[in-house]
Amino acid sequence: MFTSKTIRIKKIAKVNSDSIKQLEGLFKGNTNVYIDYANVRPWAFKLGWNIEFKRLRQFLRSFDNIGDINIYDGTLEGDKNSEKSCEEKRLVFKDGFKTKPVKIMKHSIDYTSIKSTATDLLEQFIRRCLIRKYDIETIEFLNLKFKDMNNKGKFFIEDRKCNFDVEIGVDMLMDFERNDITTYVLWSGDSDFYDPVKKLLQEGKKVILFATARKVSTELNSLKEDGLFVFDIQKIRNYICWKKQIQKEIKEIL
């Protein structure tokens, strides 16, 4: 059952009730939420709006059968913006916020001993199946770009990595084993979740994927035949976005 946690949510729900009714029908029994924030964050660039953590929690808590709300995100240690963002999520989600340090890896782009037609450097950044489609001229052109960067004194590229796929998958399956959870709400479109999602569906559990158009992997999309439901987060924008990004027609009633 949905009971608005704030006056603002109640006002929005009066004119945007369809999405609430749909979610009430989807959230059956005890429901847990798992948010892969590293996967969700880039959606803002496509959608043109951002998620406000406090508003997100208030909205989800308005459904009385939602239990744990888990959000996973890496901390770039020493980076003030990253540390501030993580502290904000910790204050909002309490023990539901899970983090670990972001790993910074250095990839060599030293062209010194590389032949102009070799793919050694390219294979660090481009999948082989694509490289095989390139002609020699394209490979030579891309290698020259490495050479140009070397001439400017750059011999390494830094890559940041902090993947929570394993942790989230384990948490979902542990909740299946230990807790009486009927519905699993996963905020991600990553193909790495195929196995745990398929396992839960095979065990008769409900899995709802919160995502946005064209951001769901082919592998997860294939599980729709097994009962996976994909919910477009655009439907709940005004409940969870930054205040200044609320759509005009909704602002008028607030």
Image (spheres, grey):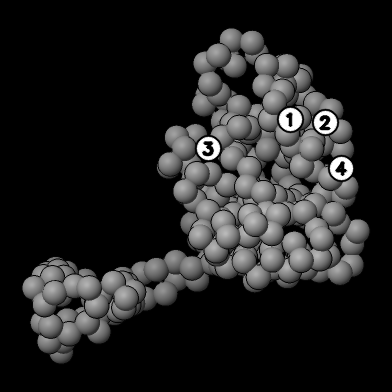
Residue 140 position in % (x across, y down): 10, 75
- The residue lying at 62 percent from left, 66 percent from top is 194
Q: Taking 207 as reference, is 26 above or below it? A: above
Are there few (<14), some (14-19), or many (20+) residues within 10 Å of tag 2? some
Residue 37 position in % (x across, y down): 59, 53
Residue 174's image quarter?
bottom right
Are there few (<14), some (14-19), or many (20+) residues within 10 Å of tag 4? some
Are there few (<14), some (14-19), or many (20+) residues within 10 Å of tag 1? some
Q: Taking 198 as reference, is 70 above or below it? A: above
Q: Amino acid at mark 3?
A: Asn
Observer-side mark, 4 or 1, equals 1
Q: Which residue is mark 2?
A: 2
Front residue (pair 16, 36): 16
Q: Which residue is mark 3?
A: 50
Q: Are marks 3 and 1 in contact (CB under 8 Å)?
A: no
The answer to whether any part of residue 38 appears in the image is no
Q: Are marks 4 and 1 in contact (CB under 8 Å)?
A: no
Q: Which mark is residue 65?
A: 4
Furthest residue toward bottom: 113
Image-based side of 175 in relation to 242, left or right: right
In 3D space, how far apart are the residues under numbered discs 4 and 2 (Cα atoms)?
Answer: 9 Å
Q: Earlier in the sequence, mark 4 or mark 2?
A: 2
Q: Earlier in the sequence, mark 4 or mark 1?
A: 1
Q: Amino acid at mark 4?
A: Asn
Residue 170's image quarter?
bottom right
Q: Which residue is mark 1?
A: 20
In 3D space, how far apart are the residues under numbered discs 2 and 1 (Cα atoms)?
Answer: 7 Å
